[in-house]
Amino acid sequence: MLPETRVWTRDEMMQRVALFKNLIGNTGGLPDSHLPEAEKEIFNVIGFQPPPGEGEGGGMVNSPVGADAARNSAIRISEGFNMGFARCKPGCGPLMHNHDTNETFMPVSGKWRCAWNEGDDYEYIDAGPCDVISFPAGVMRRFECIEAADGEETALIMFVVAGDAPANEFSDTARKRMAEVPVPD
């Protein structure tokens, strides 16, 4: 059954508007943020609240956007999905990770490599603006900028993650790489 309709005021609707020019980007908050190949700016647009127990006991379960961005949502709703953007230079993106829900990518500018699996099972597809790839829960995946937008140093990709408080966990290979490089003080 559909909800009963009502008139929404402009003030009410403005709580659900996120103009890109006003979004606040975050470059830290994920366990791989200190690595040069994982450099990224994350914009939390809709949702992405921190998952229960995030960071407890030194675990590797995190909000998909990291602790910093999870607390900085432009549209603070929990309606079964989350949406954000990542801006990266070529050669950069998060390390291989998994989510407990679906994650869908759509490049906005530039070219992106959307990869899944590791080792002998590694696969990828290169995607450009308006192409879409949707990863189910339980698939190790990553996105990496492979070409900046024309005339720019970076490219932009949109991601949508299902759930009200989705979590991610890095692969064993990613964890080993993170351990190789100390977190700066």
Image (cartoon, rainbow, N blue to C red):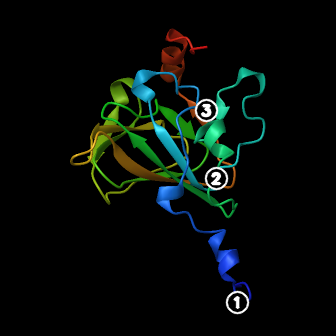
Which part of the image, by quadrant, shows the C terminus? top right
Q: Amino acid at mark 2?
A: Ser
List the residue tagged with mark 2.
73
Residue 181 location, x and y as percent?
50, 12
Look at the picture and state if 22 lies above or below 59: below
Q: Would you say the residues marked 2 and 3 are in contact, meaning their CB atoms lie under 8 Å apart?
A: no
Q: Decide: few, some or many residues near mark 1? Use Cα within 10 Å; few <14, some 14-19, many ≥20.
A: few
In which quadrant of the rendered view does residue 16 lie? bottom right
Q: Quadrant of residue 17?
A: bottom right
SS assignment at label 2: loop
Looking at the image, is mark 2 or mark 1 earlier in the sequence? 1
User: In terms of secondary structure, where does tag 3 sit?
Assistant: loop
Which quadrant would the N terminus be assigned to in this image?
bottom right
Query: Gap between marks 2 and 3, in whole Å?
Result: 14 Å
The local crowd at label 2, few if under 14, some if 14 to 19, many if 20 or more residues have their Cα within 10 Å, is many
The residue located at (54%, 20%) in the rendering is 175
Specify which label sits upstream in the sequence, 1 or 3.
1
Q: Which residue is mark 1?
A: 7
Residue sitting nearer the eye, 86 or 22:
22
| Residue corresponding to mark 3 | 29
Q: Position of residue 41 (x, y in %)?
A: 48, 39
At numbered mark 1, what does the secondary structure look like: helix, strand or loop?
loop
Horizontal side, residue 3 vs residue 104: left or right: right
Distance from the alpha carbon under mark 1 to that under mark 3: 39 Å
